[in-house]
């Protein structure tokens, strides 16, 4: 007769609870497997296998202890019981390991669930076989199948959930379901078991007999303690992992912030290792030199430094930097990808680790190319200004000497006998003096002090008018081309000086083409705004250019081209004042001279001149002064001559006396005022401009204030007069000859054309 046995309800409930807690613990520990790596992953995998497999065994063992047969004692085989304990732990660990690998598919999951479920079922039936009682045990095949399927299904679900991110509520529900399923597997198998008691009692061959309830409680307490400790360990590990992750995130954010700051900073930065190999550069560094990141990183920093960067340094920079740890503003010249040379200042600092060992050098670059060029331009401007001041002073003194020479030669020409040989010698002397005067005009042009008579000039007509002169000057091997647009504005400039400047540029272009070539003379209108790259006053300009196809100039020669007396021609073939004169003319006219040249690619010289309205030319012609009246110039006058140079003073007096005038000589403005203030008479005053203590314009102002009707002639070689000077003063340009003096006298005396006698001047009172 078979019997199904009975179960203690309390122990049954306890077994189901064990299954649920074990399932929850296994799911919780599986999460730590996913979050760990290395040995920690294996430790958590082992712990999860023990929790799951050991929990299932504890549930099974407590459930077996809950089973009772009436009047039949139950004992257990120690060896089989121990094997039934190890079996679920082993199959669970192996299954967790297989499923935990990357790229696990459904087939692997199903096979692992089959393996784990079969092992759990094997654990159950091994435990049943370990029972020792006075009864025969048999199984219902259907319920055996059901129990095995439940075990496989529960194992597959457990494996699937173990490595999925689920929340606490889902994990708790899954643990309840799995606990019920695992317990259901056990009790389904027990439902299919049938026991046939023996007629006589069998003491299980001497096996020990334990109190089932006490043993069940002991196993349960031990199981709960182990699972609780595992959960506490998982909780602490999760907390530590959270703190570590938060610190890692903060570190990554700081690193990313630093990397972004390093990369996106507007300052070009770089870092190099101990071999001076570039490890990293900022975007600004790449933008400055024009390279891509892959073209820079991994290369020596010296690959980007010009060879002539710092040949005169007293000691190498790199050893000094390693020794002192920091260097600032070291001058270098870097080479960009397109070949440009950049002047930079490099600062560097050695970065060391906590032990003081070298890590890398962090450096910064400051581009000072524009500042260097501006400083060089300023030095050149100051140099030219200084040379111009010196040149102007020399030219002024030389002008005075030439005035004496020309004046005396003029006077001498009136007194020499009519001898052809003597006359020829005199003419040669006069021509030599005039050539000296032309040279001083060039020097004054560079110093911006020559006397300019600006007017509205039609540039194309001016070039056309001097075509024959240009062709004769440059010879037959050079071709001249002109390019002028329609409706080109007039230029405000001295026509004679512009012709001379254009001729100088054409001759320079010819000399740059010894084998012949083409000279292109062109003009265009330019509009200059306030933000223009030049320092010109905003407005309209006419740009007259002369371009050749000659040898061109390198940067060093181009920078010195406008210096006075600088020339690349042979000895005796050039004065070095041509471009200086053109520069002075353009600057004094309110424009500028721009030189553009590259070696072997020719040269272009641009004269920028202020534009004038076309009608100004007609107005200028209408307002031209009347022709000098020779009769007035030759009427006997009393002329007050003021000059601090005795030679010039006596020369001017001699020319006036030769014309029949009475001359009163004074060496300073104070002496002239004393003479007039004492009642001295004069029909006209001629005064030098550059005199000590009182200039000619200052003297003229004081004379006009007291004797407003006295005509005044200002004799000077300078073009620019001080601000506020009387613009109505008659100008007599030095050096002058007697015919120029006659013209100035006639112009000055137009206001007293009807005078019949000389009236002594009296000071104006009140």
Image: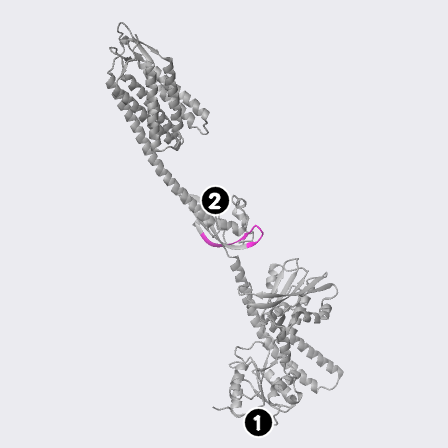
Name the side, left or right, on which 114 lies relative to 338: left
User: Which of 370/400 is in front?
Assistant: 370
Q: Which mark is drawn over residue 759?
A: 1
Q: Quadrant of residue 634?
A: bottom right
User: What crowding class fits label 1: few (fewer than 14 Cα within 10 Å), some (14-19), or many (20 or more)?
Assistant: few
Name the residue furthest top: 199
Indicate the position of residue 292 as horizontal and vertical percent values.
54, 46
In the image, residue 605 sits, relative to residue 668, either above or below, namely above
User: Which of 284/388 is in front?
Assistant: 284
Name the side, left or right, on which 213 lies relative to 543: left
In the image, residue 693 sits, relative to residue 268, either above or below, namely below
Counting residues from the N terminus, which is met first, the one under dot 2 or under dot 1? Answer: 2
Report the magenta residues as a range. Answer: 327-341
> Can residue 450 be found in the magenta stretch?
no
Q: Residue at x 37, y 40 (%)?
A: 246
Indicate the position of residue 488 as horizontal and vertical percent values.
64, 68
User: Which of 687/324 is in front?
Assistant: 687
Applied colour scheme: one colour
Q: Which residue is mark 2?
A: 274
> Can residue 334 be found in the magenta stretch?
yes
Q: Main secondary structure of the magenta part?
A: strand
Of marks 2 and 1, the one in the foreground:
1
Quick one: quadrant of the N terminus? top left
Q: Quadrant of residue 204?
A: top left
Indicate the position of residue 74 as horizontal and vertical percent values.
27, 12
Q: Residue at x 33, y 19 (%)?
A: 186
Which element type, helix, strand or loop, lies under badge 1? loop
User: What crowding class fits label 2: few (fewer than 14 Cα within 10 Å), some (14-19), or many (20 or more)?
Assistant: few
């Amino acid at each position: 007769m078979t019997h199904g046995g009975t179960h203690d309800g309390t122990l049954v409930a306890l077994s189901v609870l064990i299954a649920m807690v074990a399932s929850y613990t296994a799911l919780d520990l599986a999460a730590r497997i996913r979050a760990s790596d290395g040995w920690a992953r294996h430790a958590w995998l082992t712990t999860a296998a023990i929790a799951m497999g050991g929990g299932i065994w504890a549930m099974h063992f407590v459930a077996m202890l809950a089973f009772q047969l009436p009047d039949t004692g139950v004992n257990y085989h120690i060896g089989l019981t121990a094997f039934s304990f190890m079996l679920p732990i082993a199959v669970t660990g192996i299954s967790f390991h297989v499923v935990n690998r990357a790229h696990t598919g459904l087939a692997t999951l199903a096979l692992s669930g089959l393996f784990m479920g079969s092992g759990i079922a094997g654990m159950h039936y091994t435990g049943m076989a370990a029972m020792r009682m006075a009864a025969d045990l048999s199984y219902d095949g259907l319920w055996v199948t059901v129990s095995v399927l439940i075990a496989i299904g529960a194992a597959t679900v457990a494996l699937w959930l173990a490595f999925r991110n689920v929340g606490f509520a889902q994990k708790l529900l899954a643990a309840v379901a799995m606990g019920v399923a695992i317990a259901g597997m056990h009790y389904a198998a027990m439902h299919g078991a049938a026991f046939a008691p023996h007629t006589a009692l069998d003491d299980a061959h001497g096996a020990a007999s334990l109190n089932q309830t006490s043993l069940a409680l002991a196993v349960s307490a031990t199981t709960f303690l182990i699972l609780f400790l595992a959960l506490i360990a998982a909780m602490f590990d999760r907390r530590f992992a959270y703190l570590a992750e938060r610190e890692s995130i903060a570190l990554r954010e700081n690193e990313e912030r630093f990397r972004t700051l390093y990369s996106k900073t507007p300052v070009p930065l770089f870092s190099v290792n101990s071999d001076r190999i570039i490890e990293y550069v900022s975007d600004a560094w790449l933008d400055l030199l024009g390279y891509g990141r892959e073209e820079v990183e991994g290369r020596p920093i010296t690959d980007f430094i010009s060879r002539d960067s710092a040949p005169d340094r007293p000691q190498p920079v790199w050893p000094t930097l390693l020794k002192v740890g920091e260097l600032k503003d070291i001058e270098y010249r870097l080479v960009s990808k397109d070949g440009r040379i950049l002047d930079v200042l490099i600062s560097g600092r050695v970065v060391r680790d906590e032990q003081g060992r070298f890590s890398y050098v962090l450096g910064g670059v400051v581009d000072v190319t524009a500042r260097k060029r501006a400083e060089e331009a300023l030095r050149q401007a100051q140099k030219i200004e200084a040379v111009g001041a010196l040149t102007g002073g020399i030219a002024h003194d030389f002008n005075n000497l030439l005035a004496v020479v020309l004046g005396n030669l003029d006077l001498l020409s009136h007194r020499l006998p009519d001898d052809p040989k003597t006359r020829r010698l005199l003419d040669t002397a006069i021509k030599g003096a005039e050539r000296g005067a032309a040279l001083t005009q060039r020097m004054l042009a560079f110093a911006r002090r020559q006397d300019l008579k600006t007017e509205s000039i039609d540039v194309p007509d001016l070039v056309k008018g001097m075509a024959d002169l240009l062709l004769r000057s440059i010879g037959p091997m050079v071709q001249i081309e002109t390019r002028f647009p329609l409706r080109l504005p007039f230029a405000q400039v001295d026509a004679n000086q512009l012709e001379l400047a254009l001729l100088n540029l054409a001759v320079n272009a010819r000399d740059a083409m010894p084998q012949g070539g083409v000279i292109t003379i062109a003009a265009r209108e330019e509009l200059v705004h306030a933000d223009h790259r030049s320092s010109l006053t905003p407005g309209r300009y006419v740009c007259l250019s002369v371009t050749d196809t000659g040898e061109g100039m390198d940067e060093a020669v181009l920078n010195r081209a406008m210096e006075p007396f600088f020339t690349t021609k042979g000895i005796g073939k050039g004065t070095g004042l041509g471009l200086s004169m053109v520069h002075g003319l353009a600057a004094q006219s309110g424009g500028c001279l721009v030189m553009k040249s590259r070696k072997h690619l020719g040269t272009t010289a641009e004269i920028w001149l202020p534009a004038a309205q076309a009608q100004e030319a007609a107005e200028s012609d209408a307002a031209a002064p009347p022709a000098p009246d020779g009769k007035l110039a030759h009427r006997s006058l009393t002329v007050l001559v003021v000059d601090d140079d005795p030679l010039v003073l006596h020369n001017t007096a001699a020319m006036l006396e030769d014309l029949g005038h009475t001359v009163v000589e004074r060496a300073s403005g104070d002496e002239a005022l004393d003479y007039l203030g004492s009642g001295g008479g004069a029909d006209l005053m001629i005064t030098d401009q550059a005199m000590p203590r009182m200039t000619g314009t200052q003297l003229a102002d004081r004379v006009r204030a007291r004797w407003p009707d006295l005509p005044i002639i200002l004799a000077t070689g300078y073009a620019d007069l001080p601000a506020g000077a009387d613009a109505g003063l008659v100008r007599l340009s030095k050096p002058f000859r007697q015919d120029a003096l006659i013209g100035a006298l006639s112009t000055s005396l137009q206001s007293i054309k009807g005078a019949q006698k000389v009236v002594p001047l009296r000071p104006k009172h009140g």
